[in-house]
Every structure is written in C-alpha cells, then in structure tokens.
Image (cartoon, grey):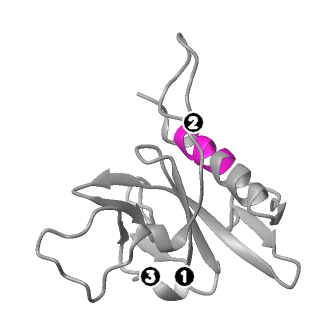
Amino acid sequence: MAHPKDIGDGTTVAVILALRNAGYAIFMPFGENTRADLIIDDGEELSRVQCKTGRLRRGAVLFRTCSFYGHHPNPKVPSRHYLNDVDYFAVHCPETSGIYLIPIAELPLTSQAALRVEPPRNNQRRRIRLAERYEIGRVAVTAKPGEPADA
C-alpha cells in the first residue's frame, strides 16, 4: 500500500498536467504548510487550489473538504475547512482517471463532498453535483512493475 504522501504527490502531478493541458499557468507555493497546493492563472485572475484524491464509491467520486488533525497528539481543533484559504478543489480520481476542478463555493465544508459519475438509483436530480460538469481532463497515473502503485 502506498504512503498517503506518495498518493497526494501523484494526485498533484496529475492535477498539474490536466490544468496545464486546459490552458492554465501554474505556480507552486513554497513549503509544506501552506493551505493551497497550487496557484493557477487563467489569464485574468489568480486562484488558490487545494488538490485532493477522490475515491469512487457507489457511483460517486468522494473527497474530503476539510483537513483532519486526529493523528496529532493534542490537536487544538480536530478538523479545519478551507473557506477563505482556497478558491478551488482539484480532485483526481484514480478509478476514473478524471480531474475535476470545483469552486469551493459550490461544496459543503463539513467533511466530504461527492461528484456523481453515475446517476443515482432513485433518480434524484436536486442537490446532485455531476462529475462531468467539473471535469477538466483525464490523467491515468500508473507505476511500472516493481514500483509502488496507487500514485
């Protein structure tokens, strides 16, 4: 099983490639403890982006919209949202190879969000975020035999 940092690095690389192919200029903040992973320039404005790895579950790409600090010995707060820290989430889902760019204003900030890849079985239409609306590209991240997988 890949280390979480390696999975995150693979996601960031996939997101950078998709953003570049979509025409964005990309800048990277210096250091590990910044709230935004990337800064993108669409030619008119700069936007802060947080990269997340999504997982395909029951027809939807699920991803976290908060940072969790439960692994720290005595966290002051157990979780922290990204409101006012980023403008977009860029999500890479290894199972679909999709890269999705979602404005933070369109997401719940409680713990996780979902993008529907398949229509819901109950045909619900309201409050559903369709993945195709946010998809900016597809990037398959694979490893050579003998190298760590799940990047």
Which residue is at 16% across, 77% downward? Answer: 123
Amino acid type at image mark 2: Val
Q: Are marks 1 and 3 in contact (CB under 8 Å)?
A: yes
Q: Is residue 139 above or below residue 43?
A: above
The residue tagged 3 is 107
Q: Is residue 31 above or below residue 128?
A: above
Work out how far the residue at label 2 is from the one at label 1, CA to CA, in angstroms.
25 Å
The residue tagged 2 is 141
Q: Which mark is residue 104?
A: 1
Amino acid type at image mark 1: Ile
Question: 145 or 59: nearer the eye?
Answer: 59
Work out how far the residue at label 1 is from the one at label 3, CA to CA, in angstroms.
5 Å
Q: Are marks 2 and 1 in contact (CB under 8 Å)?
A: no
Our reading of the magenta stretch's main secondary structure is: helix
User: Which quadrant of the rendered structure holds the C terminus?
Assistant: top right
Question: 1 or 60: nearer the eye?
Answer: 60
Between discs 3 and 2, the one toward the N terminus: 3
Instruction: Tell me where residue 82 appears, x and y as whole percent.
Output: 55, 78
